[in-house]
Amino acid sequence: MKKERVLITGAAGFLGSHLCDRFVTEGFQVIGMDNLITGDLRNIEHLMHLENFEFYHHDVTKFVHVPGKLHYILHFASPASPIDYLKIPIQTLKVGSLGTHHLLGLAKNKNARILVASTSEVYGDPTVHPQNEDYWGNVNPIGPRGVYDEAKRFQEAITMAYHTFHGLETRIVRIFNTYGPRMRLNDGRVLPAFIGQALRGEDLTIFGDGSQTRSFCYVDDLVEGIYRLLFSDYAYPVNVGNPDEITIAEFAEEIIKLTGTTQKVIYKELPVDDPKQRQPDITRAREILKWEPKVKRAEGLRITYEYFKNLPQERLYEDANHKSFEKYTVK
Ligand code: UDP
């Protein structure tokens, strides 16, 4: 077993919990941290009894202390869905800014390497397609997504500043739409929204006319890209995502086929500043990390659907958010 210790923030979240799994499997001593605002302990329950996993219930926007040595930090704490940004905008801003500052300070103190989770949202509603890392983005700072987008842009800025000014070992991953087991069923994201609707026997809600595009990456592929980036020597941002682009209308059709639902598609108003198209240019990841996604959407969706289908029935109704998007839509 490796003696190296890694701190993973957002450990009880979708991506954080999969990263915990990976680092535990690789033999690291893993410290998971989460304030459980959007995270769910059920995502890491299976790790709790392990000797090489411990969990701290802590909010990283407050001073972070971890006793003992620390070799790596992965900062994955953040709300990450448009509904969350509208419900908890201040926390979203604070975790990307103050939280990142605390973790950079901790990394400096411990002489640890830190990888921060950035996002395709730094590109905003992009005017360049596909998006490569040299594109500076098209972000509305005061729109509903601004609290997330600008926090993540600040996060990149302060991370680079710690790298250049303090010589800290830093890594920045720009994550594109990712899916898989343990996504929060009712957080408003399109995949759990559609699958949840199919399982509850509701119509599938397409926002706008469904011509907007996204490119969905299966979580195991993403984790592999992040793992490679952490152990690379590259400090500049790297896009990690799947370039296989699809319209939301086509995506709804795929979910209808997959689930066999007899419900129909209904159209709702497009949320403000909803990006029209998104596809990662992963040339840099291919070259530097020798990485590209392997899991085809049909396969990833099948695994993800199995997961949701096998959840206890009451979880489908757990969070009223699935009915409340309109309430939070800023007109
Ligand atoms: N979307 C939709 N119906 C839903 C939820 C989302 O049509 O029930 C759309 C949403 O407007 C966006 C796309 O699906 O264009 C992806 O939304 P998601 O919230 O998953 O991620 P993001 O917009 O941040 O990529």
Image: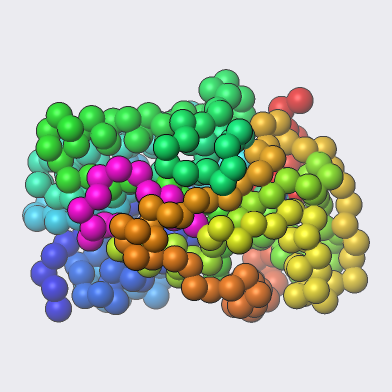
> Residue 261, image x and y in percent?
84, 72
Residue 114 in the image: x percent, y percent?
A: 23, 48
The residue nearer to you, when weighing 242 against 44, is 242
In the rendered view, tell whether residue 252 sits above or below residue 271. below
Quarter-of-image position of residue 158: top left
Does residue 235 belong to the magenta stretch?
Answer: yes
Q: Is 52 left, or right, of 265 in this rendering?
A: left
Q: Residue at x 32, y 30 (%)?
A: 157
Q: Where is residue 74 in the image (x, y as percent from the top left)?
A: 29, 52
State the quadrant of the C terminus. Answer: top right
The rendered magenta stretch, by its main secondary structure, is classed as loop
From the viewer's perspective, tell me whether residue 184 is left or right of residue 67: right
Q: Residue at x 56, y 46 (%)?
A: 130
Inspect this view and state whether residue 163 appears.
yes
| Residue range highlighted in magenta | 229-241
Quarter of the image for residue 316 reads: bottom right
User: Which residue is painted at 19% across and 37% down in the image?
Assistant: 163
